[in-house]
Image: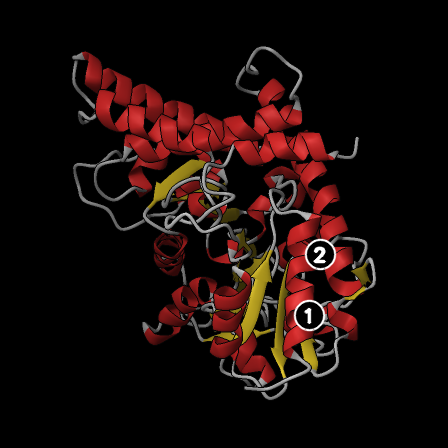
């Protein structure tokens, strides 16, 4: 059912920093694409693990056994979030970038030099550079980029079909662009990839907070996301099909385990990272069944609650997207602001749209816009290239970007629209 104002206040109480920044200033945090605020449950779980389970794994004393249990429970929670086959399909790492480099190196060891990798035109460089490195190393022949419709921000699916051939080793796709908000039709992309015998590697870092992510429904071979984009701390997770976990040969130190996710992980695991992501997923499970007095059992029950939460988030955020695009209560939306160029979808297609809005204002530098929105209106937005190929495709260096998540409010959206409308009537 739709969230009312009372329930939204309950949600916001789960995030200690949602109202004020560290200096105590009241503000609206709209830079969520660069990293979401941390839920209380994730922070508290991390702190307990850091203090009580600080020992390394593999020993007989309680701190060590407890660290092992936390790591396993964290893997199980991520598996439930993604509807993965189980904890053994979840690999952890320092960042999505490091995990994708590790994966590309392993895939490259199977290549002969004639293969290609096909990448979306709006990809983050975390899912571009690892494949370009294989070209430089002589492992594959080339990286091919799928065209974008610059008016709509959508992928050209006909171009994708033409680019994928019998020598395509990987199709790499973002679940949603971190600049445009465009969602990829991952099931269709996966079908094209698999029909050619290629793997589908998904970067879900930006999308993970905005809707359900089901690796088995997608049919992907690999999918990566980061904890700090899902109300948790830094550190990232890679889903990899169990048969690929065993078949591929990642670079590793000799004494490390030869099987399972541990064979892919470099160095000692941080149990506090696993505790934090379990806390974040626990928050989502609560959101999926807030009237329940007991936490869900790991497995199907928790996965079902998390999916309900993500579906509710998707519905709520669609309302924020409508306000941002079309306006509300007499306030003009981004589509109607004179002198504003909006990049990306100007509507919400059937597969949805993430609440990410990148734009430029005629006569204003992007950093000046960001600074003015913060200094005068206490609105935190970005102004950079976001490590994305998108600015290059559109022939600009940077864009202003506001990214909403479900703890943001209608008032936040209207405050941003009023402020941007105000900037268009004068220059400085």
Callout 1 environment at 10 Å: few (<14), some (14 to 19), or many (20+)?
Answer: many
- Left or right: 235 in relation to 194: left
Measured as percent of width and height from the top left, residue 254 is found at 17, 41
Q: Are marks 1 and 2 in contact (CB under 8 Å)?
A: yes
Q: Which residue is drawn at 69% across and 79% down?
A: 340
Would you say residue 257 is visible in this rendering? Answer: yes
Residue 189 in view (yes/no): no
Q: Mark 2 points at which residue?
A: 353
- Structural crowding at the residue carrying mark 2, measured as other residues with C-alpha within 10 Å and reported as few (<14), some (14–19) or many (≥20): many
Is residue 358 placed above or below 398 in the rendered structure? above
Residue at x 48%, y 33% (from the top left corner): 280
Q: Position of residue 425 (x, y in %)?
A: 68, 82
- Identified at 72% across, 68% down, the residue is 157
Q: Distance between the residues labelled 1 and 2?
A: 10 Å
- What colour scheme has been applied to the protein in the rendered image? secondary structure
Question: Tag 1's secondary structure?
Answer: loop
Residue denoted by label 1 = 344
Check the image and report above or below for 321 versus 230: below
Q: Quadrant of the N terminus?
A: top right
């Amino acid at each position: 059912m739709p969230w009312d104002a009372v329930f939204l206040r309950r949600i916001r109480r789960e995030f200690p920093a949602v109202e004020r920044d560290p200096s105590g200033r009241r503000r609206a945090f709209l830079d969520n694409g660069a990293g979401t605020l941390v839920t209380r449950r994730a922070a508290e779980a991390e702190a307990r693990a850091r203090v009580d389970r600080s020992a390394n794994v593999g020993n007989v004393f309680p701190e060590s056994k407890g660290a092992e249990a936390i790591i396993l429970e964290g893997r199980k929670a991520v598996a439930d979030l993604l509807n993965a086959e189980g904890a053994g399909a979840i690999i952890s790492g320092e960042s999505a970038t490091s995990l994708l480099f590790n994966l590309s190196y392993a895939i490259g060891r199977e290549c002969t030099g004639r293969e290609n990798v096909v990448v979306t035109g709006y990809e983050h460089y975390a899912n571009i550079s690892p494949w370009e490195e294989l070209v430089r190393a002589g492992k594959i022949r080339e990286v091919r980029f799928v065209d974008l419709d610059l008016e709509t921000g959508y992928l050209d699916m006909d171009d994708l079909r033409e680019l994928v051939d019998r020598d395509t080793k990987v199709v790499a796709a973002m679940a949603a662009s971190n600049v445009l908000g465009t969602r990829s039709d991952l099931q269709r992309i996966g079908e094209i990839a698999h029909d050619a015998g290629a793997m589908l590697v998904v970067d879900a870092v930006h999308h993970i907070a905005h809707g359900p992510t089901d690796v088995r429904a997608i049919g992907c071979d690999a999918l990566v996301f980061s904890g700090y984009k899902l109300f948790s701390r830094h550190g990232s997770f890679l889903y990899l099909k169990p048969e690929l976990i065993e078949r591929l040969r990642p670079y590793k130190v000799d004494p490390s385990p030869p099987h399972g996710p541990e064979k892919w992980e470099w160095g000692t695991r941080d149990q506090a990272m696993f505790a934090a992501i379990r806390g974040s997923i626990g928050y989502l499970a609560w959101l999926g069944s807030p009237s329940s007095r007991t936490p869900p059992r790991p497995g199907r029950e928790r996965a079902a609650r998390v999916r309900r939460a993500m579906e509710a988030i998707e519905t709520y955020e669609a309302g924020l997207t409508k306000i941002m695009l079309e306006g509300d209560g007499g306030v003009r939306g981004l589509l109607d602001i004179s002198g504003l160029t909006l990049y990306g979808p100007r509507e919400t297609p059937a597969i949805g749209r993430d609440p990410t809005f990148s734009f430029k204002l005629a006569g204003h530098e992007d950093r000046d816009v960001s600074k003015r929105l913060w200094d005068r209106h206490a609105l935190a937005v970005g102004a950079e290239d976001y490590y994305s190929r998108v600015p290059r495709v559109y022939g600009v260096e940077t864009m202003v970007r506001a990214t909403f998540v479900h703890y943001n409010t209608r008032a936040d959206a209207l405050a941003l629209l009023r402020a941007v409308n105000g900037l268009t009537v004068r220059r400085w």
